[in-house]
Image (tube, grey):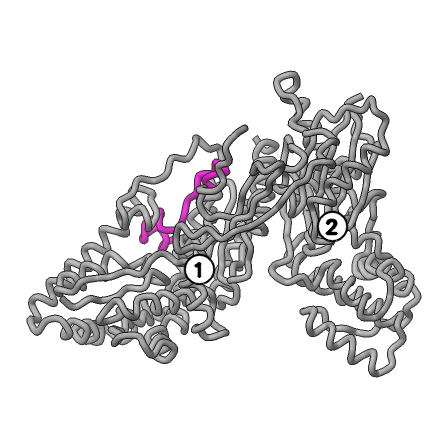
Amino acid sequence: MKGYLGVDVGSVTTKLALLDEHEQLIASIYLRTRGNPVDMVKQGLREIQKQISPEVEVSGVATTGSGRYLAGVLVGADLVKNEITTHAVAATQHIPDVRTIFEIGGQDSKIIIIHDGIVVDFGMNSVCAAGTGSFLEHQAERLNVKIEDFGGHALRSENPARIAGRCTVFAESDMIHKQQLGYPLDDIIYGLCQSLIRNYLNNVALGKEIQPRLVFQGGVAFNKGIIRAFNEVFDSEVYVPPHNELMGAIGAAILVHEEMEIKQNHHKSKFKGFGVSDIEFKTSSFICKACPNLCEVSQIAADGKVLARWGGRCDMWERVPES
Amino acid sequence: MVTVGIPRALLYYQYYPMWKVFLEKLGAEVVVSLPTNKSILNSGVTRGVQDTCLPVKVFFGHVVSLADKCDFMFVPAVTSLGKKSYNCSKLIGLPNMARALIPECPPILDPEINYEKGRYNLYRNIYEVGRHFTCNPFKLKKAVEEAWASNLDYRNKMSDEGITHFQAIDCKPPPDVKSSSLTIAVIGHPYIIYDEYVSHRLISWLQKMEVKVVTPEMVSQEELDAATRRLVGVPHWSFEPEIIGAGEYYLETGVDGIIIVAAFGCGPDSMMLGMVQHRAKEFEIPLLPLSLDEHSSEGGLLTRLEAFLDMVRRRKRVCV
């Protein structure tokens, strides 16, 4: 049996999804990146291998997410794709009548507008992370609430506190102020959810044509409070697909399946096999002093051999001798 | 020989050939700062005023890097270039800010270019600069005429041959882009899109992704002005033709997509680019807005570019 693997290395979590030839999900894993994408990809591969029968042959692998280039080198990717395209592909495959995708991840949030199954417009948050999962997680920590319990608290709120959402720094001082005034925890938590949605709609989704069906995916879609806040803004229900957290990885797997089908017999997958999880990879970085630009170049090596380098402003370091 | 420093930033891109001819004909030697690099950026950001945009901060970095290499610094105050139209206040006050922020800077030559104050004022301002080099008014007049001619040449060369500022200044041939099926217009001030440190090599990335890039200076000034008039009448900002005019021109002539690039916090751009965005929606041409500042990372830029091109390619395939 053939399988197609999608690896989504985000800033906060790492997701792997394995699809069969009929694009059905046969194995998946969701891990926290914890600032260590290399180990998480290795661990992810180990877990996937445990979940599947030995007959499954990985015939294509694609990487996505902000760590896609690094992950691509690690696993030997046939395709490296940005996360906007992969999220859109997965959503249109699973929910054919989707028109708007809200995707809120750890460090960035996106909106994707779809017309007849094609992306026609998208938006991404600019420099600030105010409308993302990191913001909620940080506040949960400050309130001493587990992020998993966040949704439950939010649903119980009856009179949400109004918290400024323009900037995390202001939101935080505003939240502390409300705490000092004695607002109940539930109301503060739901107030945070509302402020995140306000910021998202005023920043990322500004000027976009939001039409139903609305689909909400990404890790933050687990949060019932955010879903409640979304539903209060829109007339139509926001739909959260099953495997919302895996959509990027699923989209990558679908794309690599298509790609390998087209190429058929001409190309064998570059997948390095599950054995990758036993290889010791070493990442390092240095400052190139060849010109006044002083680029920070990072590299990944295995067994003393450099596999890839990036980060330079010219291609001086990008050419790695082929083995 | 007297040396005059020209910072490689802001209006350098539009007017360098003219300034160079003018100063050289007067007998000065011209030195230009290096292309923006990390130390130029860092000194500009630490010395610059917090509220200014990144290109202005970069400009101060260039002034610092030239301070000990020349006898004069050439920083014209370009106030107005047409009736009832004005430049951004940061460009108008550039020489004064440079004087205040960079005390070690050699004397600044700062002719005010202000259309609204009339011809006589312009002549007098240029004469003031020329006096540092020559007492002969005929020599000065000749230098001005030759400089103006070279400015027209430069402008025409770019629009006739469809080349960029760089290629026109350095006489370099345009890069070989593999036969590409996509044409994308990149709209923004030249000091943003051609400063590789500010734009994170946006144009070379696009060319690597097999895209034919067209930019505002590849359109003749007459056509830019005409397109601006059609859309907004008399422009309010001096550089409206290169943004609104170019956007309108490319929307009307048809491109596969438009990328608009602005410096974070730029007031005029927020309005001008908003206008282009609005028009792109009416023409149903995909548009990607990019806002750049010193914190923007190349990774985020690439993700947006890749997704945008995926989208444009997909759309094109379906529409055909």
Above or below: residue A135 compared with residue A270: below
Q: Which of A219 and B240 is in front in this view?
A: A219
Query: How far apart, in angstroms, are the residues tagged by discs 1 and 2?
Result: 31 Å
Q: Let me know if residue B115 appears in the view.
A: no
Q: Which quarter of the figure is the N terminus of chain B placed in?
A: bottom left
Callout 2: residue from which chain? A
Q: What element carries label 2?
A: loop
| Residue at 73% from the left image edge and 48% from the top image edge | A101
Please name the residue that numbered disc 2 is placed on: A33
| Residue at 41% from the left image edge and 58% from the top image edge | B37
Q: Which label belongs to residue B38?
A: 1
| Residue at 54% from the left image edge and 55% from the top image edge | B290
Q: Position of residue A138 (x, y in %)?
A: 76, 65
Q: Let me know if residue B210 appears in the view.
A: yes
Instruction: Tell me which segment is drawn in magenta.
Output: B206-227
> In the drawing, does residue B297 fall left or right of residue A130?
left
